[in-house]
Amino acid sequence: MSASNLGETEGAVRLCQVNDVAEGNGLQINLPERPPLAVFKIEGHIFVTDDTCTHGQASLCEGEIEDGVVECPFHQGAFEIATGKAISAPCSVHLKTYQPILVGDDVFVHLDKSSS
Amino acid sequence: MAHIRIADADVSFECGSDDSLLRAGLRANLNLPYECNVGSCGTCKFELLSGEIKVLSENAPGLSERDRKKGRQLACQCMPLTDCVIKVRQEDGAPAKFSPTRLKVKLIKVTDVTHDIREFQFQGVSPATFIPGQYAMLQLPGVSGERAYSMSNLPNDEGVWSFMIRRVPQGVGTQVLFDALALGDQIGLDGPFGKAYYRSESERDLVCVAGGSGLAPMLSIARAWSQKSKGDEESLTFFYGGREPRDICGETMLQQLPEFNQQLHFVPSVSGAGLDATNAWQGRTGFIHEVMHGFEGLDYANSDFYIAGPPMMTQAVMDFLRESHAVPQERIYFDRFF
C-alpha cells in the first residue's frame, strides 16, 4: 500500500477486491443511484468500465471476453476493454472507462472521472 | 420454401427463396433482432449451423472483421438455398404488433414538401397497418434492391401509405421516384418494419428530433400523439434541423394539429452552411443538439426522445442526451439508416 495511492482514493468509491474478479472475466458492481460498473481482469490487469452496453440493455459482464475485447451478449457488438472503444456493429457509442486505483487488494475508482 | 430452425429454441419458420431470413422470421411473428434491414447496422447477426445460403451483400458494413472471423452473417442479407439451422438470440418481450407483409400499391399523389423532399402517397387494397415511427421497404420498377422509407401518415383502413422522400443526387432509387414513376404506377411494398415506433402508453412529455426526410416518422408520431387522450400537461417539442432555410419543413403539417403552439412547439434550426443575407433567416441557428442545449423548457428526466435523421445528427443528439442529461437508453428511440 503506497502513500500516494492512499491519497488518490479520497472521494473514490471502493468497488471490490482484485481477487473477487476471476482472470479473463468481468464482475458486475451495483452502486446506488447509477448504472452498474464492470470490473474486468485481463492478464492480471484490472480495468473498469460501464457495465451496460451502449446499444441495448445488456450486461457486458455476461459477454464473452477474448483478446482484451468484450462482446455484448445481445447483438455481438464489441468493445476494447482497456479503451472502451466500440469496434463492432451495432455498437457505435464508446463505452465509458474509469481509471482503477489499486490500494493493496482493493479496487477504487472516481465515478466523476470517466473517459469515453 | 425452406425450413429454418433456430437452434436451442423450439422455433422454426418457413422462408421463401426470394425472402431474407430476417424478414421471413419477422413474418412468422418472431422477435428477431434488427434495425436497418439493409446490412448496415449489424443488429441482425446470426450463425449458420447447417444448410446453404445466398448472401446479397458480401461486404455489408454491419459485419466487422471480428464477426467475419467468427463466421457470422446478417439475417437481412441472407436468403436460403436449402433448409437451414441457425443460431440467433431472440429479443425479449413480444414482437411489434404487426408482422410485415408484401403488398402491391399504386402511386396516387405527389406533393412537394421542400426543394428536395416530396411526399409520395400510395394506395393498397388492404388497410395500412403499422405503428407510427415504423418504415417500409419499397421495391421500385427497374431498381435492384429495396429502399427503406418511414411512413408519415397514420395507420388507416383506406390502405394509404405516405412517405416523405429526399432526392438523393445521382441516386437510382429516388430518380425513379422523382422522375419516372407516374400516378397509377404500381410498386412493391414490404412492411411494416422498425422498432423505434411510438409508445403511446407513455405519459411522459414527448420530444421529436428530425432532420431531412426523418420528418416523416416524427410527423407520424406527432399525429398519433395529437390523437391520443392525454393530460393537459403532456407536451410535445418538435425539433427540425436543416442546413439551409429552404430545408426547413414540417410546420405547415404540425399547424394542423389542435395543440400547435399550445402543448406542441415546433423548433426549427439551420446549421449555418448556406446562410447569407438573402436567406434572411430569423430563427435559431446551429446543429440540433446545440439548439437543444440552449433550449429551456425540456424536462429531460420526464421525456421520451424519438430521433430520425442523418446518422451524424442522430449520433450527436444521442451523445448529448446521454452525456449532458443522463437520459437512459430506454427513453431514446431511433432506427439507424445509412
Image (cartoon, rainbow, N blue to C red):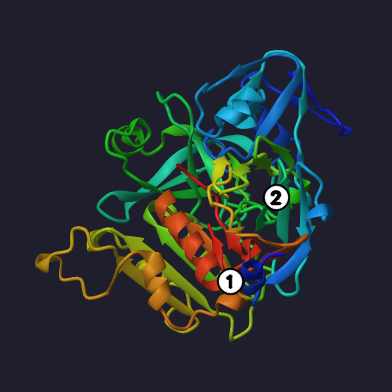
Q: In the rendered structure, which amino acid carries the disc numbered 1? A: Asp
Q: Position of residue B334 (x, y in %)?
A: 55, 55
Q: Is residue B254 left or right of residue A22?
A: left
Q: Please, which chain is the residue tagged with disc 1 on?
A: A
Q: Between B327 and B334, which is closer to the camera in this rendering?
A: B327
Q: Between B133 and A104, which is closer to the camera in this rendering?
A: A104
| Disc number lying in front (1 or 2) | 1
Residue shown at 60% from the left, 30% from the top: B66
Question: In this rendering, does residue A76 appear at all?
Answer: yes
Look at mark 1 in the image and give the residue it sits on.
A112
Crowdedness of circle 1 by 10 Å Cα count: few (<14), some, many (20+)? few
Asked which secondary structure carries label 2, the reply is: loop
Asked which secondary structure carries label 1, the reply is: loop
Q: Is residue B213 left or right of residue B151?
A: left
Q: Position of residue A112 (x, y in %)?
A: 58, 71
Q: Can you tell which quarter of the image residue B244 is in?
A: bottom left
Q: Between A98 and B284, which is closer to the camera in this rendering?
A: A98
Q: Between B268 and A11, which is closer to the camera in this rendering?
A: A11
Q: In the rendered structure, which amino acid carries the disc numbered 2? A: Ala
Look at mark 2 in the image and give the residue it sits on.
B96
Give the farthest residue toward the right: B10
Q: In the image, is residue B157 above or below residue B13?
A: below
Q: Position of residue B152 (x, y in %)?
A: 48, 55
Residue shown at 58% from the left, 27% from the top: B77
Crowdedness of circle 2 by 10 Å Cα count: few (<14), some, many (20+)? some
Rendered-image quadrant of the N terminus of chain A: bottom right
Residue shown at 47% from the left, 50% from the top: B162
Q: In the image, is residue B330 above or below residue B96?
A: below
- Whether the residues at callouts 1 and 2 have beta carbons within 8 Å, the answer is no
Question: In this rendering, does residue B124 appear at all?
Answer: no
Q: Position of residue A17 (x, y in %)?
A: 80, 59
